[in-house]
Image: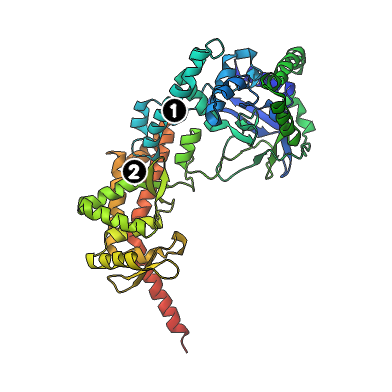
Amino acid sequence: MDTTRRLRAFKRWMRAHGVECSDALRLVDDPQDGVSVRTLCDLKEGDVVANIPKKACLTMKTSGAREIIEAAGLDGYLGLSVALMYERSLGEQSPWSGYLQLLPLQEDLPLVWSLHDLDSLLLGTELHKVVKEDKALIYEDWKESILPLTHSSPQIVDPKFFGVEEYIAAKSLIASRSFEIDDYHGFGMVPLADLFNHKTGAEDVHFTSDSSHGESGSEADENNEALEENRSEDEASTQTSSEAEQAFNQVPAENNDDGADEDSYLVVENDHPVLEMIMVKDVLTGAEVFNTYGTLGNAALLHRYGFTETDNPYDIINIDMELVLGWSSSSFSGRYTRARLALWRRLGYTPCESQNSEYFEITSNGEPQTELLVLLYILLLPDNTYNKLDLAVSTACDENGFFHVMSPGNHKITFGQTSSDIENDVFLTEDVRGALISVADKRESLYGTSSLEDDIAALKECCLPRDRRLLHSLTLRVSERRILEKLRRYARLRVDGICEGKRRKKRLNLNASP
C-alpha cells in the first residue's frame, strides 16, 4: 500500500473509532523515515491536539486474544506481544487493521539484528553483551510461554504468526511505541500518539491519561483543505467504517467472562476514558511536533528505540566491576584484590547493578562515580594504612556510622559516606589517577583495533538510509570513546587544577588580610 493510501486508511480508522486529531496537525508519511507529525498553523502551550479513547488502544484487555492471554497467565510486555501478534494474524478482520497497516513489520532495534551485525557493529559498546543476553532471554520466553499456545489452540493461535521471529518483531514495536495507559490496561499500543517522533530535551507535546476532555484550543480553519483531501473517498467508506466500529466495540464485551469483570472495565472507562496529547510549548507553523521518551543517553536510545543523537548530553559509559578487578589482579594477587574488595563492601559501598552485572558509571563530562574512586583508593592503599582501616571497621565507627583513617599524606579520610557527602578530590592520589587511566585504556581496548579517529572518519562517510545500523552504532561508539577520553583528561588534570585553585584561594586570603 502506498504512503498516501496508508494515511487515508488510518484517518478513516481514527474517525470510525473516535480518535480525534486536531486539524492543526498534518501527518507526513516518508518512505525512508516513516510517519511524522507537523503543524499546519502555530500551536500554543496548553492546546489539546489529540483525544484518544482508551477502547481504541490495543491492550491485553481490549484485544480479541484477551481470554487466551488470561488463561495462560500472561501479563506485561509478554501478554501485550500476544495481543499484537493475534491482531496481526487477523489481517483486515482485526478491529485495529487500519492502524496496524501503518506500523512497520518491526522496528530496527539491535534486538532484531543478526549475531553477525551485533558482533561487528556493537563490539565494545554498552549494548554488545546486553543485547545478546536479551536475545537469549526472549527466546526462552517464547519457548516457555508462546510456543505452547500454538500447540494447545492452533486454530486460534496460528503458528505462522506466532513464531520466534514474529515475537521478536512484536517486542521491537512494543519496546519503541507502547505507552503506560492506566492500572487496568497496563501498557498498550496507542494509535496516533506513537507517531510523534522523539527529541531529547525538546518535548513539544505530552501524553497524558489525566483527561480534562477539553477541545483543542487551536483549530486551523484556514488549513482544513490540506487535511480534507479525498473527502469524497472517505465518505464513500462510511458504511465500511461503521461496520468496523461495531466489530471493534464488541471486543471488550466478547472477552468479559463474567459480569464483575465487565463492571470493572466500565468503572475504569468512566473514570478517564480518553487519553490526551497536550502541547507543552509553542510550536510554529510547519515545524515537526516532538514527544520525548525521557532524558536518555545513546546506548538507551539505540537499545529501546533504534536510533541515536549526535552530541547527546545524557550519554554515559559504564565500566564493569569485572574489568576493574581484572586490572587489579594484573598487578596484585587475586587474594589481595578479593580482600580489599570485601573491605570496600563492608564500608557500605556498592556499584550499580543490572541483569546480574555490577558496574560504575562515567558521566558525559568524564567524571567517574565516587564508588569507583573509593575502590581504587582502597586497592592502592599501603598495607599498614589498609590494616588500620580494616581494624577500624572491625572494631568501631563514630556516632554517624563513619570510619576514619589517616592517609599516607597525613590527611584524615572518612569512609562510609554516601556519594553526595564525599569530596572526590581526597581520593585522587597520583596512584588513583594512574589507575583511572589504566582502567580507561583497558575499557577502550574492547572496541578492537580501530581508533577513535578511525570511527569518526567512518561516521562521516555514513549515509541514511543505506548505512542506518552502521551510522547509529558508530555514533554510540564515538560518544562512548569520547567519554573515555574525558575520563583520562579528568585523571591527568584534576589534581593540577585543585592545587591551582587552592593556591588562588590562598592568594585571595592573603590579599584580604589587614
Residue 443, numbered label: none
Residue that extends furthest to the bottom in the rendered view of this protein: 514
- Per the image, the residue denoted by label 2 is 452
Q: Is residue 65 left or right of residue 55?
A: left
The quadrant holding residue 16 is: top right
Could you say where residue 369 lies in the image, as x and y percent from the top left? 40, 55
- In terms of secondary structure, where does tag 1 sit? helix
Could you say where residue 282 lies in the image, as x and y percent from the top left? 69, 44
Q: Is residue 363 left or right of residue 105?
A: left
How is colour applied across the structure in the image? rainbow
Residue 138, numbered label: 1
- At 31% from the left edge and 55% from the top edge, which residue is drawn? 342
Mark closer to the chain start, 2 or 1: 1
Residue that extends furthest to the top in the rendered view of this protein: 155
Given the image, on which type of amino acid does mark 1 rest? Ile
Could you say where residue 9 lies in the image, as x and y percent from the top left? 67, 18
